Amino acid sequence: MKITPKPGVLYAVRSQRDISRDELARQMGVTPQTAYRVESGRVDPSPRFIAALMVLTGAPFESLFELIAEDAA
């Protein structure tokens, strides 16, 4: 299984808070490069990234991320 942010979720979080990707990354405790790579689909989010976004937004895993079967990816 692969974990990926739901399409547009990171953009939506930034828009709702009226913050940049760099500021979102700072608030999550990750680098701006990490936030960009996860949002663009270049890398899968780490457990730390997932937890930080859940804590920051107060949203459950299911509303932020989706599971994709490896053979469907």
Image (tube, helix red, strand yellow):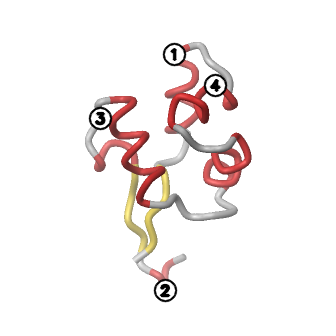
Please give the residue where the numbered disc 1 appears in the rendered image: 17
> In the figure, is residue 32 to the left or right of 63?
right
Residue at the (62%, 18%) spot, across then down = 19
Q: Neighbour class for label 4 at 10 Å: few (<14), some, many (≥20)?
A: some
Q: Amino acid at mark 2?
A: Asp
Instruction: Give the CA separation, mark 4 to mark 2.
Output: 35 Å
Instruction: Give the CA separation, mark 2 to mark 1.
Output: 35 Å
Instruction: Give the CA separation, mark 4 to mark 3.
Output: 19 Å
Please give the residue where the numbered disc 4 appears in the rendered image: 23
Residue 59 numbered tag: 3
Residue at the (48%, 50%) spot, across then down = 49
Please give the residue where the numbered disc 2 appears in the rendered image: 71
Count how many numbered circles sit on residues in the image.
Answer: 4
Badge 3 marks a residue whose secondary structure is loop
Q: Neighbour class for label 2 at 10 Å: few (<14), some, many (≥20)?
A: few
Give percent across and percent down for residue 40: 69, 52
Q: Amino acid at mark 4?
A: Glu
Q: Quadrant of the N terminus?
A: bottom left
Quick check: marks 4 and 2 in contact, CB under 8 Å? Answer: no
In this rendering, is residue 42 above or below 11?
below
- Mark 4 or 3, nearer chain start: 4
Residue at the (60%, 35%) spot, across then down = 25
- Mark 4 or 1, nearer chain start: 1
**Residue, far front:** 29
Q: Nearer the viewer, mark 2 or mark 3?
A: 3
Q: Neighbour class for label 1 at 10 Å: few (<14), some, many (≥20)?
A: few
Q: Amino acid at mark 3?
A: Ala
